[in-house]
Each structure stands twice: as C-alpha cells, then as structure tokens.
Amino acid sequence: MAWTKVCEKSEIPVGSIKKVWARIGGGIPIAVAHHKNGYVAIPPVCPHLEEPLDESGLVIGCKLTCTKHLWSWNLETLELQDEAELPLKTYDVKVEDDNIMVYVTEQLEYAFDEDDDIDESTFFEDDDDDEW
Ligand code: FES
C-alpha cells in the first residue's frame, strides 16, 4: 500500500468535508475535511451512529461537528469536544502539487453496537416540564 491520490485540492474548499475513494482493491471510502489549518482524512461515517459525515458534518475553523447529535472534534489536535465520546480514526494525508494524497494500508472502520441506538424523538427534548 502507498500514498494514493483521492482528489484535487480544488474539490474540497476550506470549511468543507467530502467523501472520496482510494482506488485500492474494490475502493476504500474516505472523508477528507479541509479545516482552517489543513486537511484530515477519516472514515466517512460518524463514530457515534454511522451517520455519513459528508452529509451531517460541519467544518468551522478547526472543528468538525456531526450535526446529528452534536459530537465534535478538533481536527488539528483530534481532541474530543462537546458531546463526543469516541475519537476519530485518521489516515495520513498530504498535499502534493494540486492533489490530496492519502496513505492507506487498510480500511479504517468503527465498531458499532446495534443496540446502541438512541430515541431520536426525545433526544432534543427538555428534561424539565417547565413552560417557556
Ligand atoms: S451520529 Fe454523529 S453525533 Fe450521533
């Protein structure tokens, strides 16, 4: 395995995240985020409940937030922020000329527990019964 081109720089403006494919084997899906100080390559799903980060991910400054349940990470330090309980897995990434290159030795994946689901209908409800 080696460095492989996944896309051109122009395809991922700063403040965005895009799903790309490493052309290895049958293809390995990767999400590349462009934060204010560089790029991060990660598995394309949220480590919480497998939400596709190219749809639910919001990149502001150096922070990635999954808008589904507000787990966040600092993409520069990879520290967990806000509601996040699990770290991101990362691929090495670099820019070569106008290309985004990712070093892929194997597909990185998270272990999801089928029973670890949450009730979407009550997630954002206020616990108090106070009227506003
Ligand atoms: S699925 Fe991303 S925070 Fe819950």
Image (cartoon, rainbow, N blue to C red):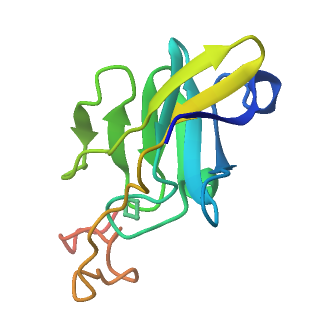
Percent of width and height locating residue 45: 47, 60
Q: Is residue 45 left or right of residue 128?
A: right
Residue that extends furthest to the bottom in the rendered view of this protein: 115
* Residue 77 coordinates in the image, percent (x, y): 29, 21
Q: Quadrant of residue 78?
A: top left
Foreground: 14 or 132? 14
Q: 64 or 83, which lies in front? A: 64
Quarter holding residue 12 = top right
Q: How many marks?
A: 0
Q: Residue at x 23, y 68 (%)?
A: 130
The C terminus is located in which quarter? Answer: bottom left
Identified at 29% across, 80% down, the residue is: 118
Point 28% across, 87% down: residue: 114
Tell me which residue sits at (26%, 70%) in the image: 111
Placement of 116 over or under 75, stated as above or below: below
Quarter of the rendered image showing ligand 1: bottom left
- The spot of residue 38 in percent (x, y) is 53, 16
Q: Is residue 116 left or right of residue 45?
A: left
